[in-house]
Image (cartoon, rainbow, N blue to C red):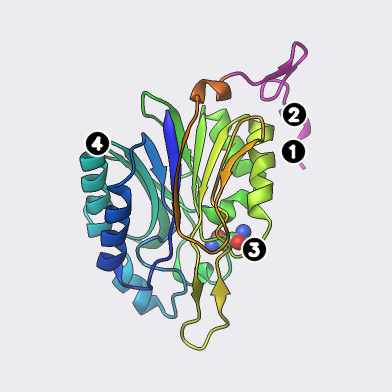
Amino acid sequence: MRVGYLQFDPIFAEVKRNLDRVAERLSRETCDLMVLPELFASGYQFVSETEVRALAEPVPDGPTTQRLVEIARERNMHLAAGLPERGTDGCYNSAVLVGPQGFIGLYRKTHLFFEETLWFRPGNTGFQVWDLGVAKVGLMVCFDWYYPESARTLALKGAEIICHPSNLVLPHCPDAMVTRSLENRVFAITANRIGTEARGGKPPMTFIGNSEVVTPRGKILQRAPRDREEAAVIEIDPAEAANKALNPYNDLLKDRRVELYNP
Ligand SMILES: NC(=O)CCCC(N)=O
């Protein structure tokens, strides 16, 4: 199975331009599953609720999801990507999974970071896994990595690959995802953005790049640079995520002592 990430530098609010550039870049890639960053077509540093509402879109009928479906159909690939979603009860920092057959699923970011808490409602979908046939895939978004329960829940629900659209600004995640993959014996594909945003007189936010694919044994198969756009496609075997046995005496998930975990 060929999977990868598109590390990308969007221009804030230039949704059509960003989508066109992504479509052009993906027209040169062949893979089964490509992960794009969080808020990849809108940008990140919102300055008002009005701005968020203007850029947020319904899922799956909004333009970004529909364009992703078009690309998935044209390129015969699955895409996981982040976008601002306009729900019936407010806006969410969401991610969608689409494929050649169309829209597959929606995830709303559970753990909001920094000023996201001003603009978005906390996600209410919970962590979900979809069986693509070629692999079982789960979604989490950026700051969800800080909570081990995120990747653990996806692993317990059978995810072989965790798609992790991100807009990372802190330095720790790329190394931390090695542990998330190791402790859950899953593949993780983190797709981060690059660039800097400094809007509305706010302090600049610089995104750290370092998108990566990590194996269930914690091996980094590819990590992007900090400050260059990059599309990478790697051959993996999702079945490596099926066996949770560390040795004949230890099974990572079966051996959990849940009765002792409650604080
Ligand atoms: N957009 C985000 O959720 C950033 C999370 C903090 C970090 N890990 O950079």
Residue sticking out furthest to the bottom:
201
Please state the horizontal and vertical placement of residue 35, each as a whole percent of the image: 42, 46
Which dot, 2 or 4, sits closer to the camera?
Answer: 4
Residue tagged 3: 170
- Magenta: main secondary structure: loop
Coordinates of residue 53 in the picture (x, y in percent): 33, 71
Q: Marks 2/3: CA distance?
A: 34 Å
Q: Are marks 2 and 3 in contact (CB under 8 Å)?
A: no
Percent across and percent down for residue 173 are 64, 53
Pointer 1: what residue?
262
Q: Across the whole image, how many numbered discs are drawn on residues?
A: 4
Which residue is drawn at the image coordinates 74% and 38% (left, top)?
262
Asked which secondary structure carries label 2, the reply is: helix
Give the magenta-colored segment's residue range.
243-263
Q: Quadrant of residue 114?
A: bottom right
Name the residue located 34 percent from the left edge and 43 percent from the top edge: 29
Cβ atoms under marks 2 and 1 closer than 8 Å:
yes
Tell me how far mark 4 sits from mark 3, CA to CA.
34 Å
Point out the tag, 1 or 4, that comes first from the N-terminus. 4
Q: Nearer the viewer, residue 178 or 122?
A: 178
Please state if 12 lies on the left or on the right of 253 as rendered: left
Q: Quadrant of ligand 1?
A: bottom right
